[in-house]
Amino acid sequence: MGFPIQVIEGNILNIEVSLNIYNKEIVVAALYELTSVCYIQQEEKDQKTILVSFEPKSDIDINLIAKKFCNNLIDQQIRYNTNQQFGRIRDMIVEEAFKPISNK
Amino acid sequence: MLPFIKDYMANKTYTILPFRFERFNEEEYLLTNEVGEFLFIKTNDFYCFTNNELDTQSDVFFNLKSKQIVTDTEIEPVIKMLATKYRTKKSILRDFTSLHMIVPTLRCNSSCIYCQVSRKDLNDHQVDMDKKTARNTVKIIFQSPSPYIKIEFQGGDPSTYFEMVQYIIEEAEWKNLFEKKILEFVICTNITLLTPSMVKYLKKHKCVISTSLDGPKDLHNKNRPLQNTEFTFDIFEENLEMIRGLMGKDSVSALMTTSVYSLGRFKEIIDEYVRLGFHDIFLRSLNPYGFAKRDENKIAYPLDDFLKNYKEGLDYIIEINRKGTYFVEGYAALLLKRILTPYATGFVDLQSPSGVGISCAMYDYNGNVYVSDEARMMARVNNHYFKMGNVNENSYQDMFNGELLHKVIESSCTECLPACAECVYQPFCGADPVRNYSEQGSIVGYRPTNETCRKNKFIMNYLLVLIKKNDPEINSIFWSWITKRTVIEN
């Protein structure tokens, strides 16, 4: 794999996540699913980049994990963007649903 | 128009409404809205939609609009309509605890290899409920605000202490003369100890019988041997005929439990159910409680094995229906009702918030009250985390409005749980805090390795694959399961 994915020490991958493309909040969401198969560390490389390191817990294809993470980032960013639009609407639906009904 | 919507709509042609999504296959996304309406959409269309670039005159847009995932009109009426549907889906919460399970005794005459309740010997009367506890149990049950009360006798095997079953039924009926609720009874028993006299009593008091049948004779005898006899299945079959003769042919329902010996034999198990005149089956995996957990190295199996068998079993049941025999897979039918209809289904093990305590409660032989049957099973191995109290010591308010129940329910709304909150299957699914705690040490659970999550996702995904085929026969079969009518009647 090329930039921004780097292999270090044989079985550890580093991926640089650009905060110009993805919101910071979604990185953790994208990583959550992968914590069952990898040890994961995040650190701020600079103001515009988060460095994520993956160390597999067992004998798995770390490249596939990296690819899955990249796809997860896209899905989570879409969720973030759309939730910015409709998050309040969801709250309103639930609030309206549980409002007491007038017996008048 | 709502102020924030007005600002948002300034440069846009439509408003996106709440939805969840997942890549369904290489070409399509699956979308679900807040109330479980779903849609498949091509990848390119999905990206156009989420970037507010979708043609509002396209079929894709109209489909999304029909599922209330998007609107290009006033939003307030849409919110009201979605709220009404949401209220319908959550109507299971309205009445509070309606299912009350009572353990009159832990004694049992079976030696099931996967016993989840850690049964006791037939002679161990120390595990019988006493009359004072029974009276207090009934008193607590009738303090539930639910207009509908179902009392379900569990065990052990409750038929080993039938006098207490009778005592509780009569105590409840007496109480109900004043409370005037809709009162029903169920007895969960291996039926091998039921006599004609007992059956006539159950019939008189409209007590439904639920039993277990694990498959053909050799498999049933292997999984569920009676103590002191080799003729378990024969006794079961004989008593089944006797009960049906007295109560009617549909008076007994059955379910199965999958052990390692059941794998690869689902077709035979289903055939046995058909042969014995049952019209439905619940293809259940092993629950990790009691002896099942203790002996898991002997009788447990990887989840993938169960899922493979489940899929084959479901396909086989669909084929049986295609050939004209009405036969239902219970879990699939439940999920189909959630996927294809706007109605709620009261299945306490798969609700949001979880049904533990607020839809069901378990009253043990010693008066201890637990949030569910599984919580009672955990107590048997000295884990009392989910004990709400005791009928002889605590009030209804202490137990059903106590700190424990509040904490458990707060942590069991899938709308707010990690991974569940964004899951496309969330509207059809539910939380199981007891199982999460038992297997993962936390009532919230850890989704990436949660086997209940993986099982439910697999089954829901497969049902949606079948629905997506739009095969008229499969559609008819599924609707016959939902409406509980045969295909011909439909």
Image: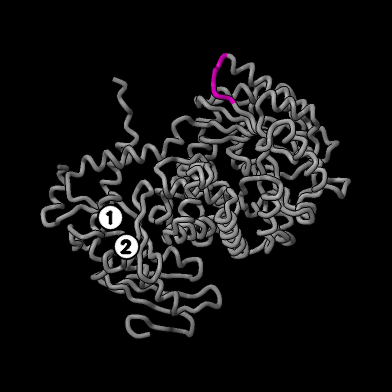
Vertical order, B390 against B320 (above or below)? above
Question: Tag 1: Cα neighbours inside 10 Å, few (<14), some, or many (≥20)?
Answer: some
Q: Is residue B303 magenta?
A: no
The residue type indicated by label 1 comes to Asn
Q: Are marks 1 and 2 in contact (CB under 8 Å)?
A: yes
The residue beneath circle 2 is B41
The residue type indicated by label 2 comes to Ile
Residue B425: give x, y in percent of width and height.
43, 54
Kindly identify the residue that appears in the image at 58 percent across and 55 percent down.
B323
Vertical order, A71 against B119 (above or below)? below
Q: Quadrant of the N terminus of chain B?
A: top left
- Outermost residue on the left side: it is B10
Distance between mark 1 and mark 2 Cα atoms: 9 Å
Residue B357 visible in the shown view: yes
What is the tally of numbered marks visible in this picture?
Answer: 2
- Picture quadrant where residue B143 is located: top right
Say left or right for A60 vs B30: right
Vertical order, B272 against A9 (above or below)? above
The residue beneath circle 1 is B63
Residue B356: give x, y in percent of width and height.
54, 39
Residue B185: give x, y in percent of width and height.
64, 29
Vertical order, B282 against B57 (above or below)? above
Residue B364 visible in the shown view: no
Range drawn in magenta: B178-183
Q: Is residue B180 magenta?
A: yes
Question: Tag 2: Cα neighbours inside 10 Å, few (<14), some, or many (≥20)?
Answer: many
**Chain under callout 2:** B
- Picture quadrant where residue B153 is located: top right
Kindly identify the residue that appears in the image at 67 percent across and 50 percent down.
B274
Q: Nearer the viewer, residue B485 or B368?
A: B485
